[in-house]
Amino acid sequence: MKASTVATNFVEYALDIGALELKDRKLKSERLSPYFFNSGLFNSGKSVLALAHAYAGPIDQMMNDKFLPEDVVIFGPSYKGTFIAPAIAVQLAWKYQRDVGYSSNRKEEKDHGDGGIILGASLQGKKVVIADDVMTTGTSFREAVEIVRANGGTPVCAMIAFDRQERGIESERSAVQEFEQNFGIPVHPAATLDDLISVLENTPAESGDDNVGEMLDKILAYQKQYGVS
């Protein structure tokens, strides 16, 4: 399957800055993965701009089909979502030349000053896009859904930077699939394992990176063992 242009550009950029690492790494699941997505390396203006652009495509399509920009708030769960959400909102506001709200949550509710658990735009009556870097177990997204609903918002979709498309330890479904089934809320990744494979398959042999073919074989074997359909 050929990756979309936006997904291809995002994967290529992530590889270039080392945010997608092609090396063996043990995961929390104890699985030995031949690749790893490290969102912590999106730590500069240029890299966060690339990240926001990758997120904005699916949200852009959703708004064209259903909502006006001012109807939407981008909600980023603490902690990494707190910088992802405003970056997406800026990208969308620039595109539409109209305001797009963003907010995040405090880890502990504040009982003085501005108070409450929400930082940023009000969620009351808004269509809310929940944006975070990855969905490993789905716990942070489940908590985000509860926070959004408790504060008067309606979650309409979730966004992640990279979907490993990998089944859980005790399930034949991935965390993304489990979340979508349990909440009826679609999850839109900026890129997926399939996109990474497509990019590696289309990397010219003369690129000078002899590691690509070897790691692609490892990734395909890993996908066959742990991937979801």
Image (cartoon, rainbow, N blue to C red):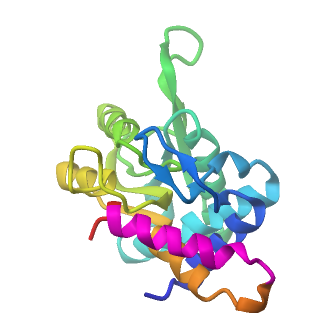
Say whether residue 131 is magenta. no
Q: State the residue at coordinates (66%, 75%).
A: 212
Q: From the viewer's side, name the closer residue of 168 and 79.
A: 168
Q: Which residue is situated farthest in the top direction here?
A: 112
Q: State the residue at coordinates (52%, 24%).
A: 106
Q: From the viewer's side, name the closer residue of 178 and 172.
A: 172
Q: State the residue at coordinates (35%, 45%).
A: 125
Q: From the viewer's side, name the closer residue of 99 and 193.
A: 193
Q: From the viewer's side, name the closer residue of 190 and 137.
A: 137
Say whether residue 221 is magenta. yes
Q: Is 53 above or below relative to 201?
A: above
Horizontal arrangement in the rendering, residue 90 relative to residue 117 (left or right): right
> Which segment did they paint magenta?
208-225
Q: Is 174 above or below relative to 75?
A: below
Q: Quadrant of residue 114?
A: top right
> If the image is split into quadrants, where does the N terminus sit?
bottom left
Q: Position of residue 111 (x, y in %)?
A: 49, 8
Is any atom of residue 214 visible in this view?
A: yes
Q: Position of residue 128 (x, y in %)?
A: 40, 50
Horizontal arrangement in the rendering, residue 66 relative to residue 107 (left or right): left
Q: Position of residue 185 (x, y in %)?
A: 27, 56
